[in-house]
Amino acid sequence: MTATSRGCRFRLPRPKTFLGLMSLQTGTELVSLALVFNKATGIYGLLALFTGYVFSALQLSMYILSVLALLSLAYCIPHIRKRPSHPFENLALAWLYTLDTAVNTVYTSVFAVTWYLASAHDPKGPAGGAETPDDASPSDGDVKTKAGAGVQETATSIALIIAFTLVRIYFSLVVMAHARMVLHRYVGEQEQQREDDDHPAGGVKNSDGLVPDVFAVGAPLGDGLKGRLGRIMVLVGRSYWLGGRKEDEEWARDVGSRFGSGSGGSGSGRRAGEFTSL
């Protein structure tokens, strides 16, 4: 996903490792397992319906989406390590995690705003507080202390929400980078197979510098429902999913030329290249 405006190119980061310690494949597995545990709460939420617990429409929709996400994860996760590569399942996993991050951010924001509005209109404070006798009146000091505590709790909650959202965004980039790597690896496997069968490769790149779309009509994975869904997934951010090493190197040189000059330019280019994959 690259955009050009006034000579500046916006480009999604493409991490090469997970936290600088593990491979993208291992990182994707860990991130996916963490999401499984997170979505398992949806099952307990739906089971609570049988106990007579009443949910709001927002809570019920969140639990239903969690169960659907859990089923999708059960389908996609086994394909992370499979060989030959399975680009469809890994692309689906990347889109699942990315969309779940966006939906989860919306739900969290709505719940946070609802909680804040409810606590702001609650005379007993956010925590409910202890009951105050009718003939007792709080002093100015007590009011200021409670108000300060409420502001501090709200600020802490907002900071935690932002921090967790940033972590989820980084995890999304890792899963997306892994899916892109699997897609490119599958193209390489197909090219190698054609060479082994003494068939000409026919060119690894299209005229626009992208690797072949394996979900295109007539391509190896272009048939049936998977082919249609694959074309939709690749259509959004096509330059990201199908952009090759040449595009990565050009972007790294472009960043290096902007942030470095003279001898410092090559060092900046190398540092920029550390965020690219493939």
Image: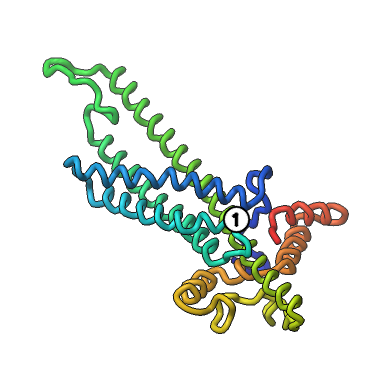
Residue 120 placement, left or right of 137: right
> Is residue 2 shown to the viewer in this render?
no
Q: Measured from the top left, where is residue 134 in percent x and y?
A: 12, 19
Residue nearer the viewer, 270 or 204 = 204
Residue where numbered disc 1 is placed: 81
Q: Measured from the top left, where is residue 92 in percent x and y?
A: 49, 63
> In the image as oriented, which residue stretches furthest toward the left?
134
Residue 212 placement, left or right of 224: right
Q: Is residue 61 shown above or below 111?
A: below
Residue in the picture at 65% in, 65% down:
9
Q: Is residue 105 shown above or below 240?
A: above
Question: Number of marks in the image?
Answer: 1
* The image quarter in which residue 153 lies: top left
Q: Is residue 89 shown above or below 63?
A: below
> Is residue 85 shown to the viewer in this render?
yes
Q: Measured from the top left, where is residue 100 in percent x and y?
A: 43, 54
Looking at the rendering, in which quadrant would you find the C terminus? bottom right
Q: Measured from the top left, where is residue 264 in percent x and y?
A: 84, 52
> In the image as oriented, which residue stretches furthest toward the front?
197
Residue in the picture at 50% in, 76% down:
227
Q: Is residue 109 shown above or below 242?
A: above
- The amino acid on which the numbered mark 1 sits, given as a three-letter code, is Arg
Report the colour scheme. rainbow
Residue nearer the viewer, 25 or 251 = 25
Residue nearer the viewer, 193 or 208 = 193
Residue 271 placement, left or right of 243: right
Residue in the picture at 34% in, 54% down:
65
Looking at the rendering, in which quadrant would you find the N terminus? bottom right
